[in-house]
Amino acid sequence: MVRTPSEQGVEGSLLSWLDGVGWETHGQDGRRGANVLDDTYERRTNDVVYWDLLAEQVVALNDDVTEDNVDQFISSLKRDLDHDNLMDGNREFYQLLTKGNRFSVTRDDGSTETVYIDLIDFETLDNNRFHAVNQFSVSRGATTIRPDVNLFVNGIPLVTMELKSLAQDNDYYDAISDLHAYEDDISRLFVPGLFNVAADTTELRYGAVGAPTEFYMKWGDAPPEYADDNEMKQAIQALCNPATVLDLLKNFVFYERRAGGDAKIVPRYMQYYAVNEILDRVVEGEPHPDPDEEGHLDRGLIWHTQGSGKSYTMLYAAENLLSRIILDTPQVFLIVDTDKLASQMRDTLANIGFEQSTIAESIDHLQELIEQGQSGLVLTTIQKFQGVDPEIQGNDEVVVMSDEAHRFMEKDLSSRLKAALPKNFHFGFTGTPVREGEGQEDRNTFDEFSPEGEEYLHRYSVKEGIDDGLILPVFFTLRHQMEWNVDEAALDEEFEQQFAGLSTEEKREFIKENITSRDLAELEPRVDRIVKEIDDHYEGVEKNDWKGMVVTPSRESAAMYGERLQARRGEEEVEVLYTATNDDPDLVQQFHTDDEERDQIVKQFKDEENPKLLVVHNMLLTGFDAPVLKTMYLDRNLKNHSLMQAIARTNRVADGKENGEIVDFQGVFENIDEALDYDTETQEYAARDKDELFDDLVEQLDTVLDIFDGIPMDDSQETLDECLARVSTHPEKGDFKQGFRRLQNLYESVSPDSRLVTEGIQDEYKWVARVYTAFQRHHNRKDRPEDAMREKTKEIIESHVDVGEIKRDFPVYELGTEHLEAIENMDEPATAATSIAHTTREHLQTRTGQNPRYERLSERVNEIVEEWEQGDRSDPEAVEALREVEESVIEVDEQAGEQNRARAEFAIFTHLTEETPDAVDSEEQAQAVAENLVGEFDDRVDRSYPGWESNDTTLKEIEKILLDVLVVEHDLPDLMKDDSFADDVRGYLIQNYVQD
């Protein structure tokens, strides 16, 4: 029979791919590969580094470390793994990995000298040892973790991988959750770590050590030698080949101080490859006063869509230019286009501790820095070059990086910079390049930054950003056509009185030239109508705690919107932002704010506070990132890069946010080709008609309903039982769980929409939602699934689902004979199998460390469920097999007893007689050993304080107890030589007492 892919299958594939790019792999045969290294280097199960292997490599890589002093060096290094805070430890160990470890050596003349010892050779890869192994088990106290694959360089764990199988109803999100649990449980493994990998059968994500789920990313590109049609294979080969791993470790790591705790930052793939393109251009090219002269490559355009992290791309490039031997004494200029962006970048430089950086505080200061030409990073705004003298460059090795490169060409700023720095490499960074199509031939980003024949040095498109989940699709809704009730006769009469001397043609020409969209935007009847539309629409947006922005064509119209929206929603929910002048009319003056007030309003908007709506004119359309912003109400004519900038305000990713949204009151999107003068792909993916989203919803609803084909769509209990049976096994179980998750997001993105009611979609959706609620309760009885539903979905469930009925039909059974009796009354075998499997797993989850039989029974449950889900067992066969396991679990519970001492004795006795029967002479001896061990533990281990179970004093005392009882009292030294036996016994003692 053909079997579906399993976790073990994914594991084997990854190991084979790693083997193909230079790792020495163990475990491709399906066995536990870590055992090979464990046996070779005599690793204890609580060690996270193969110390003997590292000792060999340190001696080989460093003349100052010898066989005589290597043990001293390794002992000092072991202490560097102990930290209360993972990120602090990771940051400090990173310095040891990349800079070397301080070590005092004694010279032949008796003197001592402090030297730095390399743990890794970053220059000659072949001098290192690269191992990839599966099932690397690490224990600490009663806790043991066993990630699926680990990558070691010279015995040091740099990458930890957790793998899942979609066929077993798990995906990479579950893998990320496991990695987070591992980081919490045994953080020592991750102190040396670079990044983690989470993968399932089809998808792979990677994230820096300590990264939250939303910062686990795709690796979506590869150089030609690693390109492959299999995206996961390509990602493993491109990201995890030894050269790239060491390059990332040495040259692409930042640590950023953040309010909620420090964060480790590793690059996204487009950042990594763009930086390497820049470095290659600098190596290959030559700065020249005439960049168009043939043979001088000294420019390049980095065209990365908004939200892809251009700031960090520039910082990674600057760090590499300054730290690597590419230029002798490079001076790097990082140029931004506003004081606000300069302030943000200043904060970022401070937070990541960028050592060689200087901020140009004034024009004179900038001129001084250019004249001095000192190697390092200089941060400045482009506007400061307006006052800098020409030809003052004091360093011939200058690299300029201009953020928002389309602004670089305004007000002849380009000429001023070229005059001050005539010899430089110049790289432009933009998400919204300007083309000649705008009618301004002197403003073409491509001509300015790209050598002849090259459009861009590196590109990351809107489509790639959406496909990677880095940004969201943005949907637009047209609201520009309105009915105007006009008293035409009165209007004609008034017009004739004012312009009696004009001909009809002259009147038309006057209206055409003088009545602008701004004038229309300030007409009170139109403002009143749009404000009502915004208020009504935003009611649906705010239910999920998203926020909105109103973009206006003038300060007057912004003030008018602000007045009316505050009247409807309250002053605390609406803020208005624009620049202020002394002679403003009262209408505009009422919303005057200074810089400090504006900064506070923006900060509160980004947080979970009021305001909920911002009304803006000429503010916050560039460089403003607020993931909580979902909907933009656009009443201003924008085009091309300005429109792309506006779109990007709504496309930032946030948990539960399916898309951004623009409600268009100006008709900007009526003709997307004219609004966005970019290539077809950019036009197609920048913003999409909301009808597409509705079509996606209908299609997804049909996909989910197809799972229940042939089952009547009524609310009877028989139907609900049949539905649950249908989604109890693979593949329907996984299809339903993932399908409804997407359906829920789409429904909430479309709502409110009258078509949901008129086309019957809401009724079908509420029926599916009822099944999903029952499904969730049936598979995860401790959580209320309706608590996890978002607001609009929850309203439907509350209105149309009888949750009480579901509670009665699927009660929470504790494992016992009453549960087995209740199973007999279930009509559907599939439903019964699901119930037994879930209840037994839940019962065993907290007991697997208490007795070896529990672990074997847990493995048996998983084996039966896997065979059932893959079709190797029928529903009735699965029910019978699971019932037998459940009876065995109940039997072990009864034998173990309720007292902690009795449970611990029974566990050790069971282990001795069933796991290591050759180690003891008889059951009587096994019983005596068990009683003595538990008795000594009871007497000698202080359990009166919180955390006793993981305290080093406890663990050391248990080691002494094992020596005293096994070696001294019972003469069983062989058991002490078995590390796994000692680990297991320690677990039985702690787990059975801590659960008391």
Image (cartoon, rainbow, N blue to C red):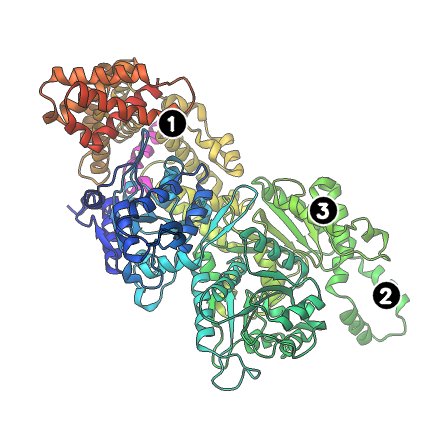
User: Depth-wise, is mark 2 or mark 3 nearer the camera?
Assistant: 3
Q: Is residue 82 magenta?
A: no
Residues 918 and 205: in front is 918
| Picture quadrant where residue 888 is located | top left
The residue type indicated by label 2 comes to Phe
In the image, what residue occupies the spot 25% across and 30% down?
983
In the image, what residue occupies the spot 27% across and 29% down?
837
Q: In whole angstroms, how far apart are the C-alphas of marks 2 and 3?
A: 37 Å
Residues 744 and 239: in front is 239
Residue 373, placed above or below residue 292:
above
Residue on which the image places disc 3: 575
Q: Which residues are magenta?
A: 717-734
Residue on which the image places disc 2: 495
Query: Can residue 827 be seen?
Result: no
Asked if the residue under mark 3 is in contact with the one under mark 1, i.e. CB atoms within 8 Å, the reply is no
The residue type indicated by label 3 comes to Glu
Residue 325, placed above or below residue 803:
below
Of the numbered discs 1 and 3, the one sitting upstream in the chain is 3
Residue on which the image places disc 1: 951
How many residues crowd around disc 1 within 10 Å: few (fewer than 14), some, or many (20 or more)? few
Give the percent coordinates (x, y) of residue 589. Answer: 82, 51
Give the percent coordinates (x, y) of residue 7. Answer: 26, 44
